[in-house]
Amino acid sequence: MAITKMKRLRLIAMNQDRDGLLKSLLHAGCVEISEPEAYLEDEEWSALLKRGSGDLSEAKALQTELKQAVDVLAKYAPQKSGMFAARDEIRERDLMDRKTLDKTLETARKVNGHAKSMGQLAARVTRLQADQMALRPWESCSLPLEQKGTRTVRILLGAAPNTVDFHAMTGAVTEAAECVEITKLSEDREQQYLEVLVHKDQEQSALEALRSCGFTFSQLKELTGTASENIKRLDEEIRQTQRQMDQELEGVKSLASARKELEVCIDRVEQDLSTEGVKERLLTDGSILYLDGWLPAEDAGKLEKALKGFDCAWELTEPDPEDYPNVPIKLKNNKLTRCMNTVTEMYSLPAYDGVDPNPLMAPFFIVFFGVMLADMGYGLLMMLGTQFMLRKTKPKNPNFMELFFWCGVSTFIVGALTGGFFGDFIPQLLKIINPASTFEMPALFTPLNDTMPIMIGSLVMGVIQIFTGMTVSVVKKCQEGQFIDALFSEITWWIILAGVALAIFGIGTVAGVPVVLVIGILMLVFGGTRNAKGFGKVTCLVGLVYNGVTGYFSDTLSYIRIMALMLSGSVIASVFNTLGATFGNVILFVIISMVGNALNLALNLLGCYVHDLRLQCLEFFGRFYKEGGKPYQPLAINTKYVDVIKEEN
């Protein structure tokens, strides 16, 4: 239950063994290889070694190809799967098999080929439909589209705005050119489509009159035959193209059985991406390679086994204090406290020379959550739901589910103490069945009747957590040889607070003077001003007293939210139960109550989690926590679709 001790690894090996060495380290999964910037900035190192290179672009291209094939299958050949389906398991040798990858890549290319053809055919259908739509307004024209006129008559096809009155336009054109005939073929919301027959000698006069009415020539392509004939031809081309699309779609569906293989190969290529990325962190001169990295001290045996059989020289050393900001952090906790990684990682990992907060935070977080939710029914649902998810889906990172399981246990226990089971569900139900029923759930205390004791209890829990954080800070400072800082920062306030409590009860007073309190105040005056000079001692003391008193007071009051959430959850549940009971029908009562309690549970799960998180991150961590750690990210097999069964080499 601490921050795992890390060792620094320095390794020199033959460059020809690079691929085999990285494959062995990938299998071991315990070495994080560092970036080499520090060495490259050193003139002596950069003169000897250069950054290595890998085929990262090729691996990314394969990944893109495989993912595209999976996306195509998901779109055109969707597969129904259970909401809580567990991931398949595969042996490591099968995952890393190159022949399987090559074979599946061929399948992926076939799927993508079908998809590409479908895209091209779909674009063609769209283009044909657009051509067809352009011809629709001229469908009633009986003349061939290539016909431009006769020896004496000119045929004009065009459109005018629909806002122009057709009869007025016809009159204006007829007045300008006597030998003209205008026919309206069709119209839509914006245009009216016209066929104009005019004597060639009067064409210019007719055109001038038409243009004054907004007439524009049609933009039809060079087509032969009538518009109706062309529309029918396009219909046939569209049907033929859609049949080709259906054939390509069937080709995609015929490859749907390869979905699992494609997903496995995506995971396989992910390992190649990791390895190729690591190659760029190596330093080499073409003959040898050098790597710098970190591994947990407890995994030294794994490393030794992974390097067996390679001609290399390596050493493990303790990190120097100046290296601490770069040391990756791996938290080691038991089954109860590892769930708190969810909270710690959300906030920030501790620094390497800091304190693992999980064992300290776990009891407070879990108990606070249980007190805020405080209902046996809700706790039971949380326990059953999380266990179902853990057993059914077998997540790779179960921390979040485990956290809510333990919070469910705490919620159930506190609910038993307060007599809450979906609020007052049972008493209300019994009253509907038997109006004379006076049954009440046994309870040590209830949120609605014991508000003041619950508030005091919340404040007491807050004081305990604040003092715990202060204690951790004192211990840490003492270990680092900073006892004086601990004495005047935390211990002084302990003495002052203890003196206040003793003075209230009249204990430890001499001639009416509270001795313990006076000692604490004198320590505060001396310790808080020992580094200040002149008038600065006064301002320093005022600021110290103000910040200390208001800080401890406000931090302690923050824990009243524990009582507030307990009270609000209980009231909302009771309101829904009372609302359901007003109908006097058991079935309606159960339906309304369950719906209301489901909403109440959803709301309070979020509210309790957020407020509990706030208490830990602001009120607790601020006392002792040193954040800024970098997560430990070793070169290891990491998959999305399958779980890998590791085998000994």
Image (tube, rainbow, N blue to C red):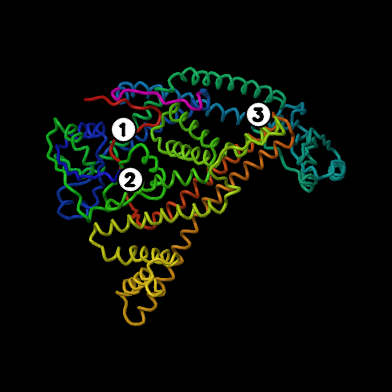
From the viewer's perspective, is residue 50 above or below residue 584? below
Report the residue marked by disc 1. 637
State which region is magenta. 81-93
From the viewer's perspective, is residue 393 above or below residue 411? above
Residue type for callout 1 = Ile
Q: Residue furthest bottom?
A: 534
Mark 1 or 3, closer to the camera: 1
Report the residue marked by disc 3. 223
Query: Which disc is residue 631 wearing?
Result: 2
On the rendered image, what quadrant is the N terminus found in?
top left
Seen from the viewer's position, the closer of residues 565 and 270 is 565
Mark 1 and mark 3 lie on one chain; the one further toward the N terminus is: 3
Mark 1 and mark 2 lie on one chain; the one further toward the N terminus is: 2
Residue type for callout 3 = Leu
Judged from the image, the secondary structure of the residue bearing numbered disc 3 is loop
Relative to residue 240, is residue 534 drawn left or right?
left
Mark 1 or 2, closer to the camera: 2
Relative to residue 295, is residue 334 drawn left or right?
right
